[in-house]
Image (cartoon, rainbow, N blue to C red):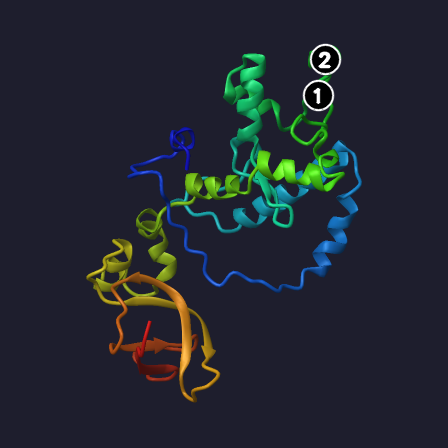
Amino acid sequence: MTDAALKNLKGEHKGNKHLINLIDSPRHVDVSYEVSSDLHITDVDGEEAYQKFQWVIESVNGIISKHEHPLLGDVMVYAKKGLVAFSTGIHGWAFTLNHFAKLYAFKFDIDETKMMEMLWGDNFYDPKRMSRPLRIPGLNLANVGLFSMFTSPLDRLLTCKWLPAVNLLAMMILHLPSPCTAQIYRVENLYDGSSDDVYANAIRNCDPNGPLMFYLSKVIPASNESGRFFAFGRVFSGKVSPGMKVRIMGPNFVPGETRDLNVRSVQGL
């Protein structure tokens, strides 16, 4: 990250490098049902595009609201707070309103926070009159002209250089909590046992010296060896090493019983 971006990073940090673990990223996903609906916004004006974006944001917030928790605080996403990224993987660009807020705040000598508020919502800018005489719902500064950027390969290349997809990663760094922070409140959902036993405390503290607590998300059989599997997952506490024995508790495991409980040895990492 750049030094300018690091100024917005909350909490302590060392250096300008950040590790993000992307586990089992899908490469071939059937999203044809989404593509067919999204094609309707490829040739629309700014008003229609805004309405589509706003609908998507409201839908996401509707899902988030069903899983509210006091320890999480407000986890809704707001475009005017820089919590929404507009991006395209095929063209390799991404941006949040922060990018344009800094640009226009400097140009018009306006506070960056106030500019963020203006870039989303009922604001309209008249470039000929150099003023904001009207307030038209939906027609906002951020997406006006956005769809006119990609009329040629050169335009797409320039946009990729101007708004690199690294902006999406920067948003993850600025807003996603580290495991040390997140597991303090997520332990309640990660572990069904007592909230103050050795396992819960190890998860809560991300203790590398505690008992191994590993979430197994996917198991793939080895193609050339019978009885061997590749296991993918996440370590919440402890360490995994070759040769150690682990207890694998399946989805139907009941504490105190042996049903859906298997003991296996880790053969390699």
Q: Earlier in the sequence, mark 1 or mark 2?
A: 1
What amino acid is found at the position of numbered circle 1 in the picture? Phe
How crowded pointer 2 is (Cα within 10 Å; few <14, some 14-19, many 20+) is rated as few
Report whether 209 appears left or right of 168. left
Q: Position of residue 192 (x, y in %)?
A: 34, 65
Report whether 107 appears left or right of 3. right
Q: Residue shown at 27%/55% (left/top)?
A: 206
Q: Residue shown at 38%/33% (left/top)?
A: 6
The residue where tag 1 is placed is 124
Q: Residue shown at 36%/76% (left/top)?
A: 249
What amino acid is found at the position of numbered circle 2 in the picture? Pro
Examine the image and state in which quarter residue 199 appears.
Answer: bottom left
Q: Position of residue 66 (x, y in %)?
A: 53, 50
Q: Position of residue 138 (x, y in %)?
A: 71, 30
Image quarter (top left, top right, bottom left or bottom right) of the N terminus: top left
Label 2: which secondary element = loop
Residues under numbered marks 1 and 2 in contact, where contact means CB atoms less than 8 Å apart: yes
Q: Which mark is residue 133?
A: 2
Q: Residue furthest left?
A: 209
